[in-house]
Image (cartoon, rainbow, N blue to C red):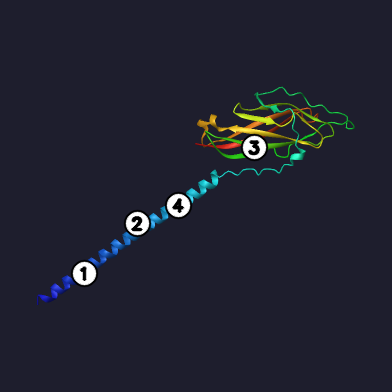
Amino acid sequence: MDAVPQDRFAAHAVDQAYSSHRENKAGLLGIVMVIIVLLTLAALAATILNMVLKLPQTPMMMIDESQVEHGDRVMSVFEVAPAIPPPTFPDARSSHPELDIPQRMHHLGRVASDGRAEHTFILQNKGDAPLAIRNLYTSCSYVYAQLTSATIAPGKMALLTVTFDGDHYHEATGVTIMRGIIIETDDPHQPESEVWVQAFITP
């Protein structure tokens, strides 16, 4: 008579052990799923951050060296608000220079706070008289510009190399900095022109 209750007790114990095993297995599976979800979210966040910080660089234009003027170089000076003469409007029949800048803005991409980056802009003379570059001004003393020639013959070009010195922007890490160069010429229609560079400062 005692065997039946003992058998039931043993069966009940087995059921409890099996149920406990299933619960433990389900709990472990839940933990694994949570870990997988967290890893997926972390990978997604890293991808989005990389897309945000991966700033595109403007492609370099092809330069025909035979068309580049090399003469008295022009170096930039830092001046916040240079005095620019007002434009004049010559007789349409007279010859005059005409400055053309195909690209006026360039993104340097990521620049380390202890590094440098540079870009070369093209200045063309599409007029029928020599173009004189009178002055170059920068909007910041940590940006430098140098022009290959102070005079550009009709149909020719000069190269303006702009250097961005990231060594002075330690406090601006994680920020995009934009700086400009003002070009003063004898083009009667636009005596003042500008080009700009910008960079994302990294540690």
Amino acid bearing label 4: Leu
Q: Which mark is residue 117?
A: none
Q: Which residue is mark 1?
A: 14
How far apart in space, not on screen, are marks 3 and 4 (Cα)?
A: 38 Å
Residue 4 lies left or right of residue 70; in this view the side is left
SS state under label 4: helix
Image point 21% across, 69% down: which residue?
14
Location of residue 198 by image quarter? top right
Location of residue 152 by image quarter? top right
Query: Between residues 63 and 49, which one lies in front from this camera angle?
Result: 63
SS state under label 1: helix
How far apart in space, not on screen, are marks 1 and 2 (Cα)?
A: 26 Å
Q: Which residue is mark 2?
A: 31
SS state under label 3: strand
Q: Residues within 10 Å of mark 1 (few under 14, many from 20)?
A: few
SS state under label 2: helix
Q: Which residue is mark 3?
A: 119
Q: Position of residue 129 (x, y in %)?
A: 84, 31
Q: Quadrant of the N terminus?
A: bottom left
Q: Which residue is mark 4?
A: 41
How far apart in space, not on screen, are marks 3 and 2 (Cα)?
A: 52 Å
Of labels 3 and 2, earlier in sequence is 2
Seen from this angle, which residue lies furthest bottom? 1
How far apart in space, not on screen, are marks 1 and 3 (Cα)?
A: 78 Å
Q: Nearer the viewer, mark 1 or mark 3?
A: 3
